Amino acid sequence: MKICNICHKISATGEDHIDCIQKRSIELEAEDFKNNIPEKLNLSKNDKDLGVEMKAVLEHLAREKENSD
């Protein structure tokens, strides 16, 4: 028996829980996707084609990414 490195609970198999591993990978994929949205759309070229709501969301994501770096 060992402690899961992700949830810090006892693991009977001696390894991290499969559910914890899957949850962590999904969270990382979502974070990568969120961080790549502004680069994919390239705001400097397409900002006139986007709606006001989409511009606000993308600017918020770009600011959030800058703050985390």
Image: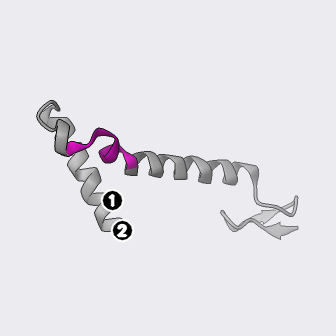
Find residue 58 and report its horizontal and vertical position in percent: 25, 45
Residue 44 lies, with reference to residue 66, above or below; the image says above
Residue 10 lies, with reference to residue 21, above or below; the image says below
Q: Residue at x 15, y 30 (%)?
A: 49
Find numbered disc 1 in the image and state the secondary structure of the residue it sits on.
helix
Let me know if residue 61 is in the magenta part.
no
Question: Which span is picked out in magenta?
Answer: 36-43
Q: Which residue is mark 1?
A: 65
Left or right: where 64 falls relative to 4:
left
Find numbered disc 2 in the image and state the secondary structure of the residue it sits on.
loop
Let me know if residue 38 is in the magenta part.
yes
Which disc number belongs to residue 69? Answer: 2
Left or right: where 22 falls relative to 42:
right
Find residue 57 and report its horizontal and vertical position in percent: 23, 44
Q: Nearer the viewer, residue 59 or 14?
A: 59
Q: Residue at x 29, y 59 (%)?
A: 64
Q: Residue at x 15, y 31 (%)?
A: 51
Find residue 41 and report its horizontal and vertical position in percent: 29, 39
Which disc number belongs to residue 52? Answer: none
Q: Which quadrant of the figure contains the C terminus?
A: bottom left
Q: Residue at x 32, y 47 (%)?
A: 39
The reply to whether dot 1 and dot 2 touch (C-beta < 8 Å) is yes
* Spatial CA span between label 1 and label 2: 6 Å
Q: What amino acid type is highlighted by mark number 1?
A: Lys
Q: Main secondary structure of the magenta part?
A: helix
- Residue 12, quarter of the rendered image: bottom right
Mark 1 crowdedness (10 Å alpha carbons): few <14, some 14-19, many ≥20: some
